Image (cartoon, helix red, strand yellow):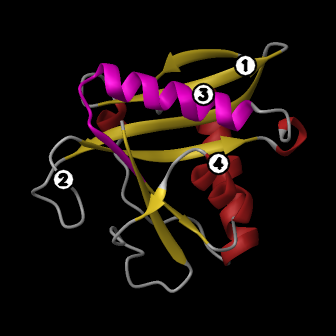
């Protein structure tokens, strides 16, 4: 897989994000309503990546900075958002590779910790994060009171 930095609003990003939102509808009955501004994923405040295999966009994910002024966050945090692998490309280590690239780029940008929110109806995501060194943390964001929500963090 070739990983490229692109805009959150790049056509390939939009295609993958739309597919992810449809998956949320299947798993949770609705799209993710977290407010996301494409500007948040522009360096130096964030980054968005798309992975390509055989010329096709098959993976996406990004991070955006958060600091201690927001509930649940510490100075130096970056939040992972919109991490997704198309179903036909799953099971090949692409998610782990993309996650490693997100960790590397966030660290190189001076971020100290990555945080993320996922849900109990995404057991494969929870397994990826916990096997990659992420531990459960205080819930944050719009789903902090949702019993299906789980938040994780990893020091970089």
Q: Is residue 19 left or right of residue 72?
A: right
Q: Which is in the foreground here, disc 1 or disc 2? A: 2
**What residue does disc 3 label?**
11
Cα separation between marks 1 and 3: 13 Å
The boundaries of the magenta stretch are: 94-115
**What residue does disc 4 label?**
18
- Above or below residue 24? Residue 48 is above
The reply to whether discs 4 and 2 touch (Cβ–Cβ < 8 Å) is: no
Mark 3 or mark 2, earlier in chain? 3
Which SS class for mark 4?
helix
Cα separation between marks 4 and 1: 17 Å
Which SS class for mark 1?
strand
Cα separation between marks 4 and 3: 10 Å
Residue drawn at 63 percent across, 49 percent down: 131
Residue drawn at 85 percent across, 14 percent down: 54
* Residue 45 image-quadrant placement: top left
Q: Which mark is residue 52?
A: 1
Cα separation between marks 3 and 2: 33 Å
Q: Which is in the foreground here, disc 4 or disc 2? A: 2
Mark 1 or mark 2, earlier in chain? 1
Residue drawn at 49 percent across, 17 percent down: 5
- Above or below residue 114? Residue 117 is below
Q: Is residue 42 left or right of residue 21?
A: left
In front: 50, or 36?
50
Percent x, y of residue 156: 36, 35
* Residue 27 image-quadrant placement: bottom right
Mark 1 or mark 3, earlier in chain? 3
The reply to whether discs 3 and 2 touch (Cβ–Cβ < 8 Å) is: no
Q: Which is in the foreground here, disc 1 or disc 3? A: 1
- Above or below residue 73? Residue 85 is above
In front: 13, or 153?
153
């Amino acid at each position: 897989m070739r990983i490229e930095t692109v805009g959150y609003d790049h056509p390939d990003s939009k295609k993958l994000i739309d597919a992810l939102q449809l998956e949320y509808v299947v798993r949770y009955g609705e799209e993710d309503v977290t407010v996301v501004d494409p500007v948040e994923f522009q360096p130096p405040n964030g980054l968005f990546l798309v992975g390509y295999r055989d010329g096709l966009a098959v993976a996406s994910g990004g991070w955006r900075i958060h600091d201690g002024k927001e509930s649940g966050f510490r100075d130096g945090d970056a939040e992972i958002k919109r991490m997704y692998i198309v179903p036909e490309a799953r099971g090949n280590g692409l998610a782990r590779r993309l996650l490693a690239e997100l960790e590397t780029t966030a660290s190189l940008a001076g971020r100290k910790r990555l945080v993320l929110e996922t849900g109990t109806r995404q057991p494969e995501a929870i397994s990826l994060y916990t096997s990659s060194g992420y531990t459960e943390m205080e819930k944050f964001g719009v789903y902090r009171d949702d019993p299906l929500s789980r938040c994780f963090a990893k020091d970089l």
